[in-house]
Image (cartoon, rainbow, N blue to C red):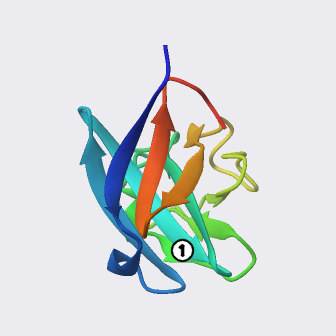
Amino acid sequence: MTSQIVACDAGAIDEGGALKVEVNGLEIALFHIGGEYFAVDDRCSHGNASMSEGYVEDDGTVECPLHAARFCVRTGVPLCQPATDAIRTYPVTLVDGKICLTLGAAA
């Protein structure tokens, strides 16, 4: 079953920034890159690090702050070692200036 949930106001995330939110018991990292918004699980698949505290790049990637693994925020795919497993992504839509996530379905 899928549901769309308001995560936060779009203005809460500066361009090039990230924000951790808790939605329905899930910790999710939101990113604002190139005018688009993306959502992934907040935990790195390699270690217990917060992706929202990682280094956001203009090319749509985020680097884990713990072990420097990089991930594509569009697909969740790891782009370098030490991570080998993808992180889950969530579909994002903007509705009336709010960032909404579709839960229960991978992007």
Residue 57 placement (x, y as % from top left) = 64, 80
Q: Nearer the viewer, residue 62 or 30?
A: 30
**Residue at the image point whose x is 69% and y is 83% from the top:** 58
**Residue at the image point whose x is 50% and y is 62% from the top:** 64
Q: Nearer the viewer, residue 26 or 43?
A: 26
Residue 59 placement (x, y as % from top left) = 75, 77
Task: Name which residue type carries label 1.
Answer: His
Residue matched to label 1: 32
**Residue at the image point whose x is 67% and y is 67% from the top:** 61
Q: How many marks do you count on the picture?
A: 1
Quadrant the C terminus occupies? top right
Relative to 11, is 101 on the left or the right?
A: right
Relative to 57, is 24 on the left or the right?
A: left
Instruction: Judge the density around disc 1: few (<14), some (14-19), many (≥20) Cα neighbours within 10 Å.
Output: many
Query: Residue 12's image quarter?
Result: bottom left
In the displayed structure, 7 sits above or below 25; it is below
Q: Is residue 54 visible?
A: yes
Query: Residue 79's image quarter?
Result: bottom right
